[in-house]
Image: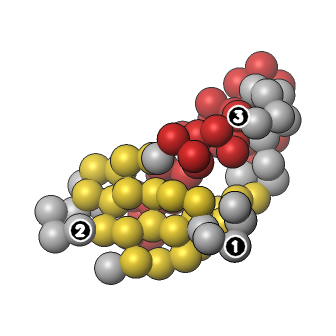
């Protein structure tokens, strides 16, 4: 099953500046677990690079992602084709 989501990362901006990108990655993982009912989440490298592109202090406010769950319940997350 494949779905495209716009993941809001505004909660990351409520944390100290020096933790924002790290918290944004955690928010993406939590969002995927909740919405895709995943047992395990794998974030691809291009998503990580997009979040960290502007440094730890200034991640994007929202990000459009494509999430795919396989039969084992493992979700892989990649950047949506429109975002690249």
- Vertical position of residue 45 compared to residue 10: above or below: above
Question: 61 above or below 25?
Answer: below
The residue closer to the viewer here, 33 or 5, is: 5
**Residue located 69% across and 73% down the image:** 82
Figure quadrant of residue 26: top right
Quadrant hosting residue 39: bottom left
Disc nearest the viewer among 1 and 3: 1
Which residue is at a point 81% across and 53% down the rendered structure image?
61
**Which numbered disc flags the more N-terminal residue, 1 or 3?**
3
Q: Quadrant of residue 48?
A: top right
Say the numbered circle drawn on residue 82.
Answer: 1
State yes or no: discs 1 and 3 in contact (Cβ < 8 Å): no
Q: Position of residue 81 (x, y in %)?
A: 62, 71
Please provide percent x and percent y for residue 21: 69, 33
| Residue drawn 64% across the image and 38% down it | 49
Residue position for label 2? 70
Which image quarter is the N terminus in? bottom left
Dot 3 falls on a residue whose secondary structure is helix
For marks 1 and 3, give the CA distance. 19 Å
What is the number of the mark on residue 20? none
Categorize mark 3 by other alpha carbons within 10 Å: few (<14), some (14-19), many (20+): some
Residue 15 seen in the figure = no
| Distance CA(mark 2)–CA(mark 1) | 23 Å
Q: Position of residue 55 (x, y in %)?
A: 79, 28
Observer able to see residue 53:
yes
Q: Earlier in the sequence, mark 2 or mark 1?
A: 2
Mark 1 element type: loop
Image marks 3 and 2: residues in contact by CB distance under 8 Å = no
The residue carrying mark 3 is 52
């Amino acid at each position: 099953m494949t779905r495209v989501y716009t993941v809001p990362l505004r909660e990351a901006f409520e944390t100290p500046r020096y933790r924002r990108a790290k918290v944004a990655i955690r928010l993406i993982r939590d969002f995927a677990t909740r919405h895709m009912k995943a047992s395990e989440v794998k974030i691809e490298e291009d998503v990580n690079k997009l979040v960290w592109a502007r440094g730890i202090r200034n991640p994007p406010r929202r990000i459009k992602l494509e999430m795919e769950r396989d039969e084992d319940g493992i979700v892989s997350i990649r950047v949506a084709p429109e975002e690249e």
